Amino acid sequence: MSRVDKTAIVRAAEEVVREKGARKLTLDAVAAQCGLSKGGLIHHFGTKQSLLKAMLEAAIAREDANAETFAAAGDDLLVSRLNSIFELMEDDEGLPRSLIAAVAEDPALLEPVKVKEDELRSEISETYADPELAQLLILAAQGMFLGRVLGVIEPGDPLLARLRERLLMLSADLT
């Protein structure tokens, strides 16, 4: 049996959610997906809750890494966050449907997401002369993101590209 690390287990759990839906996310299903015994999986994640928490943390880390990449390329805070959200939407394989699984299982697991959003709101209010408009643009992009996660908006929908450009145009007025 090959060695499977926590990152591979989280990816396997995301694959289970993507292929079978959040309700089918069980430790048995994840163990089977990554080729571990249930005991081997429990060695890494003692409970489904700890696995869900790791899935959410991975989703947050992906979004943060994307935003940092855009910021390093010269984008300001708002543009880097908008671009990051849209980048995540374009990657159908990496789309963090774990959000659905976490909310369905235990809404309290979203606490790190809420903390991150509060920090972003504070940073936006300190950075922009019109923080409400900046926040509105972020919320619009997040709404589209959730539409993609839920499968309401299809990948490659040309409207997404046009809306992305429109949000970026509106954000340019804030700098």
Image (tube, rainbow, N blue to C red):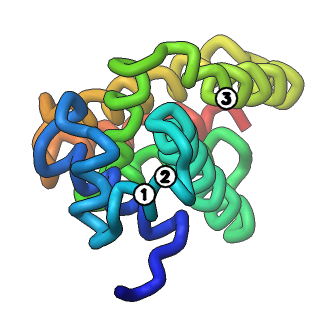
Residue at numbered disc 1: 39
Q: Are marks 3 and 2 in contact (CB under 8 Å)?
A: no
Return the residue nearer the eye: 88 or 41: 41
Q: Nearer the viewer, mark 3 or mark 2?
A: 2
Q: Position of residue 45 (x, y in %)?
A: 54, 50
The image quadrant of residue 109 is: top right
Cα gap from disc 2 to disc 1, whole angstroms: 5 Å
Image quadrant for the N terminus?
A: bottom left
Q: Nearer the viewer, mark 3 or mark 1?
A: 1
Q: What residue do we see at 73% from left, 68% from top?
A: 72
Q: Which mark is residue 19?
A: none
Residue at numbered disc 2: 42
Mark closer to the chain start, 3 or 2? 2
Q: What residue do we see at 65% from left, 39% from top?
A: 78
Residue 154 left/right relative to 138: left
Q: Position of residue 27 (x, y in %)?
A: 33, 45
Q: Against 33, is 124 above or below?
A: above
Residue 75 left/right relative to 5: right
Residue at numbered disc 3: 112
**Helix or strand or loop: what does disc 2 sit on?**
helix
Give the residue type that dot 3 points to. Answer: Pro
Identify the residue at the far bottom of this view: 2
Residue 22 left/right relative to 80: left
Mark closer to the chain start, 3 or 1? 1
Q: Are marks 2 and 1 in contact (CB under 8 Å)?
A: yes
